[in-house]
Amino acid sequence: MTDELSPVDIIAESAGPKAAAAVQPATNGEGEVFSPRLAGSQDIIITENVDKWFGDFQALDDVSLRIKEHEIVVILGPSGSGKSTYIRCLNRLEEHDAGRIVIDGIELNEDVRAMAAIRSEVGMVFQQFNLFPHISVLSNITLGPQKVRHMPKLEAEALAMQLLERVGIPEQADKFPAQLSGGQQQRVAIARALAMQPKIMLFDEPTSALDPEMIKEVLDVMQELAESGMTMIVVTHEMGFAREVADRLVFFDEGALVEQGTPEHFFTNPREERTKLFLSQIL
Amino acid sequence: MSELPPIPRPEQRPLPPAGGPRKIVLPPHRQRAGRPFRVKAREWISRNLFPSLGGTILTLISAGFLGIMVVGILWFVFFDANWNVITANRWLLFAGSFPREEAWRLWTSIAVVMFLIGLAYGTWSSLGRRDTLFIVLTGAFVIFLMAHGGATIWSSIWFLVAIGLLYLGYYLTVWMPRETSPRRVWHQRIVGGLLALSLPLVLVILMVAGGANTRQFDGFVLNLILAPVGIVGGLVVAIPLALGRASNMRTIKWTCTAYIEVVRGAPLLGWLFVALFILDDVIGGDLIIRTMVVLAVFTGAYMAEYIRGGLQALPRGQYEAAQAVGLNQLQAMQLIVLPQALRISIPPIVGQAIAIWKDTTLVTIILTLRELKGNADSAIAQSEFIPDRIEAYVFVAVVFWVVAFMMSRISQRVERAQGIGER
Ligand SMILES: Nc1ncnc2c1ncn2[C@@H]1O[C@H](COP(=O)(O)OP(=O)(O)OP(=O)(O)O)[C@@H](O)[C@H]1O
Ligand SMILES: [Mg+2]
């Protein structure tokens, strides 16, 4: 790291031609910025003024965010800023206390049926993989389709094999999760989530528990998924992924959505002091 | 438990092997670490027994102790002891007042149960060389005892038949393909159902058509009947209790907690007294049945706590992943949470099973008291204290309960201080 250049400048420089060409970002008229490839897409996730309290600690503070179908959103923010809490609210692993969350036209509330519908539309990948250790890799993947979608066993297995091909580890089908490397486990977890054929995928720091040499194999799968048109919300500290793949970056701090914009915007001229501070710390 | 074996990929599903050994992929926690290399005996001895001066001294002292004990025991067994007590009273020890002419009922029951155990073994597990060795050795030992005691040729034959049936059951099921298929699921269900029916079946064999009545269940036979009831019944009671205590719904949680704390608050003997005296006055019925209920209720309370431990040991991520995959509460419990929680709590549950097995001996006290009670009821019914006997028991029970409850509270305090109780 040199003295003359701030980390942000380095990024801007390495972004090279892409940053120079500076595609004019489109807006949706509400001040939200999204990339041109999404011009025709509908909003698939709408969160309005969402609050979340843990006891008397406010974890989310008036968060409003609209996400378009096929959009890739990367959420950044310091530890404890509410990133996990936010995406966990999106599939109701946490219940929000105020505001509205509407996903693909379904409002999240006490209604159990709405919750069941959401769970099969929204897949989630956890930092700690959370594979089911007592059943085989293949059963991990077929479980949801068989039990929730009532898919016949053979069909579910064929689907699972197809997904394992897609994430690159068909040969691991008969093993148990603990017999796989971290990167392989996380790819199984992605396959497991995809088996429910969700419209939206949530990733909560999917590579943070991985050894460096395994991070790439997981990011590659995620990138392929993004290119296939999946709507994705990714909490990550992988700035390379954010810059290459994300349509939009969103910065959280102390439970509030502080700043959002294209990767170019973030890496060249972030507006808020808190964003600048954060970026300078992690880059 | 519901353990899903690995499934081969669809396009490569192997044909069921025609027999012979089959490679079974065990989940990692069941795989034994292979021995990386063989250590020479001398090396092993010098490393483990004589590592240093202090170690050598300790080894010598322990060897001395062991030697004295072994010699003492052998001396007793072969020279001092008078085993005639055992051989002369074999039947009394084994079956007590069970009518001797009906012995075939006992043998048949044992044979049936052995056969079912064989079926279960073949279905869910495999008999290793050690198991076989163990069975052969115990068999040889029992036959030796019988021969030594001049047992009838028939009992030896019955015994061999029982062991033969164990292996027959085993070989009937062990060749079946292991990967999940509708056929295997049915096979498991049938064997499971037979196992569940085995106790009623045994009771039928023992009792119908001029067999024994429950008053004649006695000796070792009684323990053999009561212990499985206590263990299986306890598990059946324990699972809903544990889930209830872990539940978010206050009333359910408090009811289950109250059950567990009250039951654990008094010793088993206390509850057996309740079965003998209080339940007799309240609901009547057969004493053995009441005893079975008490055993299940008692064991259930303890096992529930062990299962709760297993539930707590399970990472929260498992619940969340189950939810995220779309499973509902019931499915998540049945498919993800319970199989893992039960596996975690197997060691203490087995401990409790062993404890209840030994504690069934306490039932004998109750049965002796039953005779006394019968006498007392008729002879000294007018004694002024008889009407107060329940009060006396209640008083003792409360004293016991208070102490035990305090112990349980303290352990909870410790648990909480270590942050184990909450997640
Ligand atoms: N179940 C809970 N009970 C109480 N407080 C909680 C709970 N979950 C989260 N919090 C608090 O809410 C805040 C936000 O947590 P969250 O996990 O969303 O942060 P995060 O941005 O994901 O952080 P990290 O980068 O460390 O994962 C933190 O201060 C955390 O302590
Ligand atoms: Mg987090």
Image (tube, coloured by chain):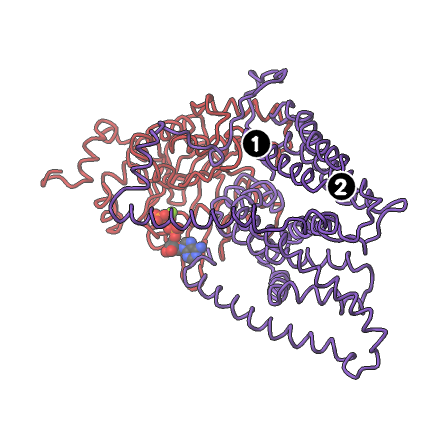
Chain colours: A red, B purple
* Vertical placement of residue B94 versus A33, above or below: below
Q: Is residue B262 or residue B130 the one in the foreground?
A: B130
Q: Quadrant of residue B343?
A: top right
Q: Is mark 2 within 8 Å of ligand 1?
A: no
Given the image, on which type of amino acid does mark 1 rest? Leu
Furthest residue to the front?
B79
Spot occupied by residue B321 in the image (x, y as percentages of width and height): 50, 42
Of discs 2 and 1, which sits in the foreground?
Answer: 1
Spot occupied by residue B312 in the image (x, y as percentages of width and height): 50, 52
Residue A232 shows in the view: yes
Spot occupied by residue B212 in the image (x, y as percentages of width and height): 84, 49
Mark positioned earlier in the residue sequence (2 or 1): 1
Q: Quadrant of residue B35?
A: top left
Question: Residue A29 bears which disc, if any?
Answer: none
Q: Quadrant of the N terminus of chain B?
A: top right
> Residue at the location (26% across, 31% down)?
A22
* Vertical placement of residue A197 versus B66, above or below: above
Residue highlighted by disc 2:
B197
* Vertical placement of residue B198 versus B383, above or below: above
Disc 2 vs disc 1: Cβ atoms closer than 8 Å?
Answer: no
Q: Kindly state the secondary structure of the residue where label 2 is placed.
A: helix
Q: Is residue B5 or residue A26 the one in the foreground?
A: B5
Residue highlighted by disc 1:
B133
Left or right: where B331 falls relative to B44: right
Q: Kindly state the secondary structure of the residue where label 1 is placed.
A: helix
Q: Chain of mark 2?
A: B
Spot occupied by residue B83 in the image (x, y as percentages of width and height): 64, 49
> Residue at the location (44% across, 59% down)?
A54
Given the image, on which type of amino acid does mark 2 rest? Leu
